[in-house]
Amino acid sequence: MTLKNKRPWGYFEVLSDAPNHKVKRIVVEQGGVLSLQRHKLRSEHWFVVSGKGIASVDGKDYSVQNGSAVDIPAKKTHRLENSSTENLVIIEVQTGEYFGEDDIERLEDKYGRV
């Protein structure tokens, strides 16, 4: 059983944590939006499992839904927003040098965490 890491927008679970990658299941609840953020030491790949939302990468918005995928290179700004009435669920695959939560640089956050 994996531990649910609660956040103001929903929660995530770590599915795999290895020296060369980390995999998370991220659930963004209705109305939830992740911080506008960037990472210096890792890239991310988001695969949408269910729900609908808007992925913003480097100032460009993309509509995402079941089966969609988005790549986020290191150092690029990004955020994810749930634009539907059901949970938005993604699988996030992180690759790079470091996967700690302290590699998050928050630029904007509707929950006051900047």
Image (cartoon, rainbow, N blue to C red):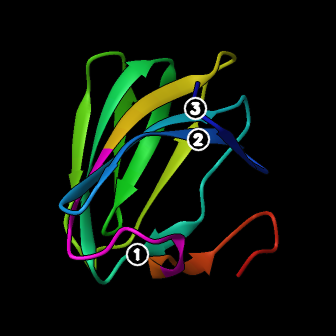
Residue 38: image x %, image y %? 40, 75
Left/right of residue 16 with respect to residue 105 in the rendered view: left
What's the residue at 23%, 55% (across, down)?
21
> Does residue 96 sit above or below 23 in this rendering?
below
- Residue 101 painted magenta: yes
Q: Residues within 10 Å of mark 3 (few under 14, many from 20)?
A: few
- Whether residue 8 sits left or right of residue 39 in the image: it is right
Instruction: Identify the amino acid type marked 1.
Output: Arg
The kind of residue tagged 2 is Phe
Position of residue 53 measured from the top left corner of the image (x, y, whole percent): 49, 32
**In the figure, 37 relative to 48: above or below?**
below
Q: Quadrant of the N terminus?
A: top right
Mark 1 or mark 3: whose residue is earlier in sequence: 3
* Residue marked by disc 3: 2
Mark 2 against mark 3, which lies toward the viewer? Answer: 3
Q: CA distance from mark 1 to mark 3?
A: 25 Å
Q: Residue at x 57, y 78 (%)?
A: 106
Amino acid at the residue labelled 3: Thr
Spot occupied by residue 65 in the image (x, y as percentages of width and height): 38, 21
Q: Which residues are magenta?
A: 93-102
From the image, state whether disc 1 or disc 2 is nearer to you.
2
Judging from the image, what secondary structure is the residue with disc 3 in?
Answer: loop
Q: Secondary structure at mark 1?
A: strand
CB atoms of marks 1 and 3 within 8 Å: no
Q: Which residue is mark 1?
A: 38
Q: Image quadrant of residue 77?
A: bottom left
Give the label on residue 12, or none. 2
Query: Whole-Å distance between the Cαs marked 2 and 3?
Result: 10 Å
**Quadrant occupied by the C terminus:** bottom right
